[in-house]
Amino acid sequence: MKQFGVIGLGRFGRSVANALVERGFEVLAIDRDERCVKDLEGKATVSLVLNALDEKALRDAGVADLDCVIVAIGDSIEDSIMVTMVLKSLGVKYIVAKAQDDLHGKILARIGADRVIYPERDMGIRLAESLAAPKIFDVIELSTTHGIVETPLPKRFVGKTLGEAKLREKYHVSVIAIKRKAPYMTKEGTPELKEEVIIAPGADDELIEGDVLVILGAYTDIDKLTGK
């Protein structure tokens, strides 16, 4: 069984650790913040409060023996670079490092990261491509608990504006787009329907029958909204 390490337990790091555990892998989760580590107690195989810049501490924790270590530090470019260097010095087999921008990514690759990832940028690209495509996505998973979901407009909201529906206040979700069929006249003068996407709709946008909502939120809250 492959053994993974995750260093940096912010939103992205926790999401990666949880996903690996759910897939049956052993996970060593590390962060210098005790509160972040406590969030994964009982989930990750081992959770440690540790300064990842301390090479001896990482060696004693068995990090050098792991098959792959993910550097998920998001609040300090300097720390992510230094930790990657420490892991390379330890001889970690495969290092995946999260980058904030292209320059950060180039530095990580140059100092030894085997793979550099850009979660925020890649998610933005995927979202833009999906919204521009004729068919919007059904689900984009952001974590094990949150995602972007396409769902038909529940009938109880038909005829209301987005502000009147109060989806954020009542269900704690955000509508990031509305997909609908809009009528138009062809060059031949015949009526047709074409797909229209309203990105970042405002409170005054009316919800009409047949709309499809693109919603960002917790799956449990989205289920409450859709009545599942």
Image (spheres, grey):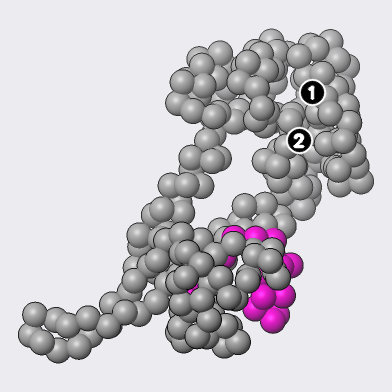
Q: Is residue 167 above or below residue 82?
A: below
Which quadrant does the C terminus fall into? Answer: bottom right
**Residue 114 appears left or right of 186:** right
**Residue 33 appears left or right of 81:** right
Which quadrant does the N terminus fall into? Answer: top right
**Amino acid on which the number 2 mark rests in the picture:** Leu
Q: Quadrant of residue 135?
A: bottom left
Element assignment for label 1: helix
Count neighbours of disc 2 (C-alpha within 10 A) and say few if under 14, some if 14 to 19, many if 20 or more.
many
**Residue 32 appears left or right of 142:** right
Q: Residue at x 77, y 53 (%)?
A: 22
Question: Residue 156 appears at what percent x and percent y?
Answer: 60, 87
Q: Residue at x 42, y 61 (%)?
A: 199
Region of the chain picked out in magenta, as a range: 212-228
Viewer-proximal residue among 79 and 180: 180
Residue that label 1 marks: 63
Q: Is residue 145 above or below residue 138?
A: above
Viewer-proximal residue among 63 and 18: 18
Question: Residue 138 appears at what percent x and percent y?
Answer: 52, 68
Q: Residue at x 31, y 79 (%)?
A: 182
Residue 62 visible in the displayed image: no
Residue that label 2 marks: 9
Residue 32 visible in the displayed image: yes
Mark 2 or 1 closer to N-term? 2
Q: Residue at x 70, y 42 (%)?
A: 11
Element assignment for label 2: loop
User: Residue 99: within the magenta?
Assistant: no
Disc 2 versus disc 1: nearer the observer = 2
